[in-house]
Image (cartoon, rainbow, N blue to C red):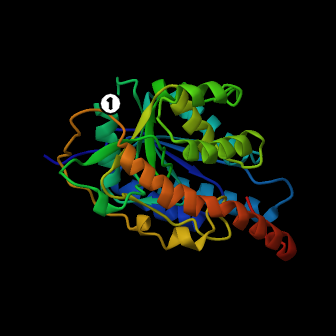
């Protein structure tokens, strides 16, 4: 019997109609019975953004051409990444108990939807699992055995899913930075001192509004509550947002990385025998990805922003 997607899908978009069309084509293949669109508004006085936002909303509406319940949340003003995603997910998860989440630059392999949906069902009532992610930063050579996925401390946001019961813990009140010393001392996720130094900087930059991001707050919320994430054995999502319209993804090292080769995962899934973080793989990911690629972004962002000001490049 063929598999049919039943899980609601939420799609966040802004001003990239061509990117959005590629993601919608994948969603349309699976024809989810419930679809939410969350559209951030244009920045005040930015006529180009206004045109692109209106075109993106038109693309979304036109491409919903199958029988389904669909709703769109259209912001009149620009909220930015942090508030658009966090408040948008609040809006979605007031309506449904769980959802698959994509953004307008995350193009999934078709098997992504089934993978996330089945894992959402498997761990629906398990409070130790906070999210199911579709992209993977692991080196495939590090994997052995037949399991289809593993558990990780890290939340990968290029295509994922979660439940209302987990998202309830998101740090809306921005109180967790004050609790960071206690979270570090308890260290439920068993991070090393080197890892904590890196993440401490990330959290402080985010809460100080030096970085318009929701996912660092979400990561800290997961760690505070001892929740881990599921990631697939192979990468299921390709990020196409490495251009001048991207919010955080401009670096060519990211675009050339093997993690952008989205492939199909096999079914039925082979489940791990227990829930537990693979610390060794996570530390390799930290050294290979976060510490190297993400670490360089700080300097690159400064250069990029300076060049943007000189060239008059409009950014989100």
Quadrant position of residue 90: top right
Q: Nearer the viewer, residue 289 or 187?
A: 187
Residue 102 appears in the figure: yes
Q: Nearer the viewer, residue 39 or 252?
A: 252
In the rendered image, the vertical position of residue 22 relative to residue 123, given as above or below: below
Outermost bottom residue? 311
Give the residue at x 63% y 29%. 171
Q: Position of residue 159 (x, y in %)?
A: 46, 50
Q: Position of residue 312 (x, y in %)?
A: 84, 72
Give the residue at x 36% y 57%. 236
Q: How many marks?
A: 1
What residue sits right under mark 1 in the picture? 123
Residue 74 appears in the figure: no
Give the residue at x 75% y 59%. 50
Q: Position of residue 77 (x, y in %)?
A: 77, 46
Give the residue at x 77% y 70%. 303
Q: Residues within 10 Å of mark 1 (few under 14, many from 20)?
A: some
In the rendered image, the vertical position of residue 168 relative to residue 109, given as above or below: above
Outermost front residue? 193
The image quadrant where one finds the C terminus is bottom right
Q: Nearer the viewer, residue 154 or 65?
A: 154
Q: Position of residue 212 (x, y in %)?
A: 71, 48
Q: Nearer the viewer, residue 172 or 226?
A: 226
Q: Is residue 270 left or right of residue 239?
A: left
Please tell me whether mark 1 sits on a helix, a strand or a loop.
loop
């Amino acid at each position: 019997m063929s598999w049919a997607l039943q899980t609601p899908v939420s799609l966040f978009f802004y001003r990239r109609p061509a990117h959005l069309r590629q993601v919608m084509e994948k969603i349309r293949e699976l024809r989810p019975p419930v679809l939410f669109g969350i559209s951030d508004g244009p920045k005040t006085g930015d006529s180009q953004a206004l045109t692109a936002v209106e075109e993106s909303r038109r693309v979304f509406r036109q491409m919903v051409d199958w029988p389904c319940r669909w709703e769109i949340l259209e912001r009149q003003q620009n909220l930015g990444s942090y508030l658009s995603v966090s408040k948008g997910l609040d809006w979605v998860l007031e309506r449904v108990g769980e959802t698959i989440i994509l953004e307008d630059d995350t193009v999934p392999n078709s098997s992504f939807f089934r993978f996330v949906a089945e894992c959402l069902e498997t761990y629906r009532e398990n409070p130790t699992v906070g999210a199911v992610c579709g992209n993977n930063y692991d080196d495939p050579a590090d994997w052995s055995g037949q399991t289809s996925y593993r558990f990780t401390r890290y939340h990968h946001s290029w295509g994922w899913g979660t439940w209302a019961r987990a998202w309830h813990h998101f740090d809306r009140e921005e109180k967790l930075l004050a609790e960071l010393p206690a979270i570090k001392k308890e260290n439920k996720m068993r991070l090393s001192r080197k890892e904590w130094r890196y993440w401490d900087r990330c959290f402080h930059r985010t809460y100080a509004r030096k970085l318009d991001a929701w996912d660092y707050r979400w990561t800290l919320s997961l760690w505070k509550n001892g929740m881990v994430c599921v990631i697939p054995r192979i990468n299921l999502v390709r990020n196409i947002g490495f251009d001048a319209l991207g919010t955080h993804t401009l670096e060519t090292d990211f675009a050339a990385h093997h993690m952008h080769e989205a492939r199909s995962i096999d079914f039925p899934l082979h489940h791990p025998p227990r829930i537990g973080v693979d610390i060794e793989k996570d530390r390799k990911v930290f050294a290979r990805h976060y510490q190297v690629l993400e670490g360089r972004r700080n300097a690159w962002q400064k250069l990029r922003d300076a060049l943007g000001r000189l060239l008059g490049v409009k950014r989100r």
